[in-house]
Structures are given as C-alpha cells and as structure tokens.
Amino acid sequence: MKREKQPEPRVTLRSIVIGLCIATAMSLLACTARYIQKGSYMMVAQIPMGVLLLCLVSILVCAVLARRFGAAFVLSPSEWITVFSMGVISAIGPNYGVSGYLVGMMASPYYFATPENRWAEYLHPHLPGWLVPTNDSRAMSWFYEGLPGRTSIPWDVWGLPLIWWLSSVFVLGFACICISVLLHRQWADHEKLVYPALAPVLEMTSRAGSGETWLPEFMKGKVFWAGFALTSIVFWWNMIAWFYPMVPSFPTATGRFIWDLLPEEYPPFFIFLSTPVICFSYFASLDVLFSIWFFDFVYMIEAGALNRIGIVATSPHYGAGPYTTTTYKWQAAGAFVSLVFWWLWISRRHLREVFRSALRTRGTVPGVGRELLSYRAALIGLLASCLYVAAFLAQLGVEAGMIALLIPTMFIAYLFVAKVVADSGIIYIQPPASAWELSGALVGGVGVLNASTRATFGLLSFTVSHPRSFIMPMVAQINRLGDFVGRDKHRLFWGVFAAFVVGVVGSTLYTIWLGYRVGAYNFRPNWLIIHEGEWQYGMTVNEILNPARMQAIDYWFLLIGAVTMVLVNLMRYRFARWPLHPIGFALSGIPAARRMGSTLLVAWLVKLIMLKTGGVAFYRRSMPFFLGMLVGYILAVTAGMVVDAIWFPNRGHVVHKWY
C-alpha cells in the first residue's frame, strides 16, 4: 500500500492570528492576576506559567471543537509551535518582564521624592524629561492614588517617554534575536544541545489531537493520568482548604523551609519542592541536576568558612546574589564570564563560517530558510542595534567608556542564561552578576564614574541588566522550535516579533490604565510598581553619596572563579566520566539555584533510580507521568484563578509562585 505523503510543516496565517490573540490575553491575564486578583505569578520563569496555561487551554478547546465540528479546528504541530513561540516571546511584556519595571521606574522618582531621601538634589537633575515624566500636574500622584472624579487619564504625559523607552526595548530585543540566530546552529548541530525544557512542549504540540477524541492525544494512558492525579489531588485539596480553613493543606506555593544544619555563619539549606521544576528538570541530564545541588553544598561550606574568618561572603537574605555585593558573588561572576568565553572559543569555527557566509557576494544569501533571519541580516541588524543602544545610553549621560563595557557585558550575561536554559532545562535562572556590576568591576567600581552615569543605574535595571536576561533565553528556545516548522521561518520571525511588540505595548498600556482606575497603591502586595523604583533609585542616590570601589580581594575571587571554571571545563572535556558539569559551579550561590537545590536533588534521585533499575526504556515509558504532573499542575493553577475570581475577588491565593 502506498504511503500517503505528509504535508510540509507550515506557519499559517491562522496560527499567527491565534498567537497574537494569546499575546493579548497574556497581557490582560498576567497583570490582572497579580495587580488586581493578587493571585499566582504568571510571568517569572523562562517558560512562564501564563504561556503554558493559555496554550494548554487553547489545545483543549480546539480538541473539543474539532471533535464536535470537524477537522477545521485541527491545528498541525507546526501551527501549535508557532502559537507557543509567539506566546513565549509575548510573556516578556507583563509584570516581571518589561511593563512592571518600566512603569514603576517611570512613575516613582518624583512621586516618592522626599527631603529625607534627597532625590531632588542628587537624582532629578540627571533624569531626562524625555524618558521620565514629572509630577508637576499630579499625573504620577493620580497613578498611585487613582483618578479624582471624572478626570481623564493624562496619556500626554506618558506619550513621549513611552515612545523612547519602547523603541529601545524593541531594538534591544531585535539584537537578542540576531545573536541567537548567529549561534543557533552551533548549539543545536555542533554541540548537540537537547533543550530539555522543550520536551513537554514538543510532546503537547506534536500530539495536540486529530479530532477523533474529545481530549488531545498526549492525554492518554494510565501513566499520564497517574501523574495528573498526583498533582491534581494535592492542589485541589488545598483549594478546599480555602473555603474551610480547619482543613489541613499541603505546603506547596507557600511552603519553604530553611534548615540551619550548620552554624549561623553558614548559609542554610532551602527545603522546598517545586512541581514545575521537577516536571521540567526530569528531562535534564543527570550531571547537570547533580552538579547544581553539589556546588550549592560547596557554596555553603566555602561561604560559611569565609564568613568565619571575617570575609563577607554572603548577603543576609539570599546568599551571594544580585542584590548584595559579596565576595563569593565575584567568584561566581568570574566563573560564569569564563564559561561564556569558553563557549565562544569552541564556537570560533562556526562563527568564522557565519561571517564568511554573510560577506559572500555571489550565490544565494546564506541562512535564508534555515534560520529566523539570514546571517547577513542578523549581522547587520546586530550592528545597527548596538549603535542605537550606544546612542541611547549616550543621551542618558552614560560615559563613553562605560557604554563600551555595558553592551558586551550585557550580551555576556544574557548569553549565559540562554545557553544554561538550552543545555540544562532549568526554567528559573539568573546571571550571577549583571552587566552594570560587571562593567563597574572592570573600571574599579562605580565610585570612579561621574554622577550622571551613576544616576542611570536605576533606569537601566530592566534593560541592559534585566534579571531574566530579557528575551535571549526565550529566543534560543524559539530558534530550536523553528527547526520543526519547515522553511517558513521568515513568517515565524515576523509572527514572533509582532507578538513581542503586542506583549510589551499591551501590558504597559494596561498597567498604566489599571493604575489610574484603581490606584497603583491598591496593587499590594506587589513589589514592582510600588517598591522596585523606590528601591532602585534609593540605591542610585546611595551610590552617588557613598560611591563603592572594588577591593583587591574581590578581584582575587573573580580570578579564582575564572581559573576554577577553566579547570572544571578541562576535566569535563578530558575525562568522559567526569561527573561535574560546569554550569553547576557558575550557578553556585545565586538565589534561583539556592531555592531549587532540594527540588533538583529529588529529581536527580528519581531519575537515577529509574535509569538504574529499569534502564533507558523504563525511563522513556515514565515520561508521560511527569507530563501528566505538569498538565495537572497547569490546570490546577487555572482552576485556582477561576475560583479566586468567583469566590475570592481581590484577595486571591498563590497557587503558582516565582520559584
């Protein structure tokens, strides 16, 4: 019997339309869930819960419609991949992506200024009016306190600053896309990265349903439903406790235990099990899972020993992290910078070929059809974007030398997170040090910079020093998903970039509108709009008044981290059975890795036992169980939002947290 030829994967118009609808819904859902409902966090991870929720609900709705009305509602795997890709990129807009930081940083410097904090004296002279609106007409006061009477929203005050901010955000996003395009083949083809975080996504999009049953095909089998039942029972039981407080509940999103096993100078153990981290990390390699936990233990021993001899190695809250300059932090910073340069070194042949191909004047333009952009377009786009960002920073008043350092260190930090996610599948991650911190270290500390440059620290916190590395990790995942959509990648690019614009613009305008309608102070509890700007600008003024300088010991630990990373890399490449992955050392001590340590240890033990007892075949048969856990968790989060909206308006419950 002759086999029927399968249609070529395509990016269709309807998939782009659905993706734009999800991008719009993402902005409304995420902002409403946090600011108004005060419920779950939708937009924190590299693969955010809001994306998983909306895409899963869309798949379920289409499966029902296809079963009832026919194949017109059946979307192909490439179409679902397009929808998911557009959803992922649009998730950088709401809350902890762009809009939360952007609106908070724009609204707070004049509203929160007091004679005590001296912002008017040391901060306001360095804030350009074309980027930060003043409070002369009480526009910012109305944003935080609500509009009086029938007063209309003063959009004219926000107009020009938003145009300039959003233009810089889009240019920076385009630069991230260009870099990801240039490196994608190196990661996917030469280094054979497996992109573990995409395993459940590809399973859902490739088996989304054919219209023959009421449910998608991936929701089949006893193994899947066993995992589904496990998480569903736990989280639905907790919802019963919302109505009956006497009913004991499971410690899930609110449960986090700190175990002070070692003396007080040593960082504590964080004991917390994260359902989404277990579901995604199960698809990661054993050495990555073990190494992150192992180096976290090493961090506790080393940091505690340093604290005991008088060297401040940890911050009071999170261990070494981006919020406090500590000695151990510079060791982690040296490690991750060394690792990025190692990655670029092993990519030198690929990058050489990329440049040669892009400069070729005869024949077809290289990269067309294989990537979101051709190599030539990516190189030109990256150069133009960097020039725009440099001009933007210069207009802000940043010194030329600092600009020359900020741009490359920004891409180093963003590349690090992007490749860690692609290699490990860890969805909660951040760089050990930001571009601002690395650049300051290279010049000897921010104390050597002029006041104008130091004043930009708060303004740049969500662009060149984004805590989630902006869109670079997401674009790396999208590039990999693009390998499954045939040769329509140019359409995928335009769809993805359109979703990026819709997510950022829609969530920003909606946040401003909500602030004026209900008063941004009523967003509590919310750090972004109310306290982020106040905290950042307070740190900025403190840096102006008390400029910090790098100490000799900080440079020594920066060097120790870099050299140790080189040794770990050499051991890994020299010995095939070397058990420690360099990613673990680069992540040691950072807040995200600290919180995930116990969860990753559990995932490592479960996966190790399965491989040792049942082999690879048994491990593969168990994958639907963890997919079922993830689907059950996503639907539990969805149900929690619905229950809150009906029975607990404006006093919601956090089913899904930010770690």
Image (cartoon, rainbow, N blue to C red):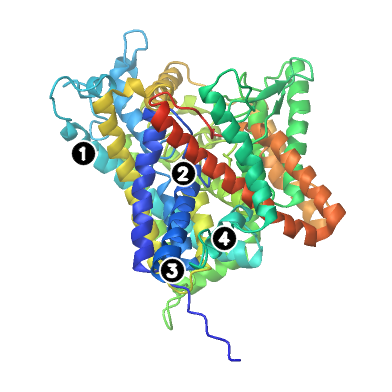
Going by the numbered disc 4, the residue's amino acid type is Leu
Q: Which mark is residue 390?
A: none
Q: CA distance from mark 2 to mark 1?
A: 30 Å
Residue 17 percent coordinates (x, y): 33, 60
Horizontal side, residue 45 vs residue 249: left or right: left
Q: CA distance from mark 3 to mark 1?
A: 34 Å
The residue depicted at 60 percent of the width and 49 percent of the height is 421
Front-most of residues 75 and 48: 75
Relative to 591, 380 lies left or right: left
Q: Which residue is mark 2?
A: 50
Residue 57 screen position, x and y as percent: 46, 51
Give the mark nearer the N terminus: 1 vs 4: 1
Mark 3 to mark 4 CA distance (whole Å): 17 Å
**Relative height, residue 40 to residue 392 (above, below):** above
* Residue identifier under label 3: 489
* Residue at numbered disc 4: 202
Residue 384 visible in this rendered orientation of the protein? no
Quarter-of-image position of residue 617:
bottom right
Residue density around tag 3, few if under 14, some if 14–19, many if 20 or more, within 10 Å: many
Query: Is 136 on the left-hand or right-hand side of 577?
Result: left
Which of discs 2 and 3 lies nearer the camera? The answer is: 2
Q: Amino acid at mark 1?
A: Leu
Please, what secondary structure does the residue beneath circle 3 have? helix
Q: Residue at x 64, y 27 (%)?
A: 251
Question: Are the residues tagged 1 and 4 within 8 Å (C-beta)?
Answer: no
Residue 447 picture location, percent across and down: 48, 24
Q: CA distance from mark 2 to mark 3?
A: 25 Å
User: Which callout, 2 or 3, points at the residue further toward the start of the chain?
Assistant: 2
Residue type indicated by callout 3 = Lys
Which of the two discs, 3 and 4, labels the residue nearer the N terminus? 4
Residue type, label 2: Gly
Pointers 2 and 3 in contact (C-beta within 8 Å): no
